[in-house]
Image: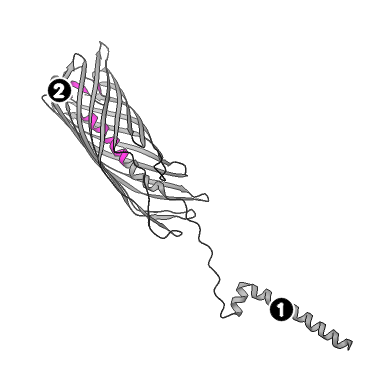
Amino acid sequence: MINHRHSVVASFTLGIVAAAALTTVVATPAVAQSICTVCPPPPPPPAPPPAADPTVHGRITGAGIEAATRFLRRLDDRGWATVAGRERGGGGADATPAASVVQGFRAWTEAYGVETRLSDQGAIPGERRRANGFIAGIGAFLGPDAAIGIAVDSGVSHVDVAGIPQHGRLAMTQIGINAAYQYALWSISVSAIYGAGDVGVQRGDGIDVSSADYGARVWGGIGEIAYNGWSIDDWRIVPKLGADWTLSHSDGFTETGGADPVTGTAQESERARAWLGLEVGRSFSSAVAVVDLSVYGRVVDVFYAHDQLAEVTSAAAPTARLVQVANEGSWGVDWGAAASVQVAPMMRFYAVYDGRYREHADSHGGTLGVELRW
């Protein structure tokens, strides 16, 4: 009787041990799969969460528009080589009347720096742009009433998106031509530019950094007409009417690195502006130098704006989505000041300040330059 009871206890104990062993084996996915032909496959590893929206890519064409507009403005100012016997846009006063300007040449070089800030627009974050570079050009006088020129701008723009670790860099070289002509008291200046460059973007996602490199291009044209009949002694008042057009294009891209790199399509931004402005200036002449001071202001209307936004996809977000951009307002005011000193008939130095104020945006820039004539 005792032996039979011991055998029952032993059998029960062995059953518990066998059940535990079987449970352990089945609980191991690899073993369970090998011994179970009807078990479902193990679930895939979870996908990484989508990274922050790649906003910085949408800001590159805006930086291109700004670079093209800035170069057009400086190139157009340099085109007024013989207008009313003076220089606009920092060129300073000319001690020689326009009618006596002989045919010849001029060369100039400038260094500039600009900072632009765009405020947040609803859920779209703002940005900060910083640009600097150099312009060099050469021009020819075609008589007392006409001049032509060509110039090159080599500059770098940095873009930082507000509140998130996203940074872009646009390095661009632009080439432009200009021409100016005066008829009686009216003057007209026209310029055209083309530029190409490289884009580098870094986008942090809290874990790693995604990066991309791609190309960018810009096109633009500008024209301005001025009336030069309002002058008293060394004072001048010059009303102006003008318009410009710019187009900025950036290529498609594929990021590398980071938790969720994205692939995006090409994008474009196009702007057309018109303005009405006024310049007031005065020249001071002495036996050793000619000093010219001027201020200007203009009301600007962006009467056409078009943005072809980039579409991006990623492994964590395969559905295409648009990259939103922050834009400045359509109306605004520009104003600035210029000073120049002609220290010799063949040399002058100048400095220029340019301010730009729009809804959601403002910009401040400075230029230092030197010009030689022969």
> Nearest the camera: 39 or 87?
39
- Horizontal and vertical percent position of residue 82: 17, 25
Q: Residue at x 34, y 54 (%)?
A: 265
**Residue underneath mark 2:** 102
Task: Please give left or right for residue 291 compared with residue 160 in the image.
Answer: left
- Horizontal and vertical percent position of residue 219: 25, 43
Task: Please give left or right for residue 51 compared with residue 2 in the image.
Answer: left
Callout 2, which amino acid? Val
Callout 1, which amino acid? Ala
Q: CA distance from mark 2 to mark 1?
A: 109 Å
Query: What residue range appears in magenta?
Result: 65-94
> Nearest the camera: 105 or 278?
278
User: Mostly what secondary structure, the magenta segment?
Assistant: helix
Q: Height in image: 163 above or below 363?
A: below
Q: Secondary structure at mark 1?
A: helix
Residue 192 visible to the viewer: no
- Horizontal and vertical percent position of residue 101: 15, 21
**Residue underneath mark 1:** 19
| Mark 1 surroundings within 10 Å by alpha-carbon count, few (fewer than 14), some (14 through 19), many (20 or more) | few
Q: Height in image: 42 above or below 262?
A: below
Q: Which badge, 2 or 1, comes first in the chain's sequence?
A: 1
Q: Residue at x 45, y 48 (%)?
A: 203
- Horizontal and vertical percent position of residue 185: 12, 24
Does the magenta segment cover residue 86? Answer: yes
Disc on res. 231: none
Does the magenta segment cover residue 115? Answer: no
> Nearest the camera: 231 or 360?
360
Question: What colouring does the structure picture have?
Answer: one colour
The quarter of the picture where the N terminus appears is bottom right
Residue 59 visible to the viewer: yes
Q: Quadrant of residue 296?
A: top left
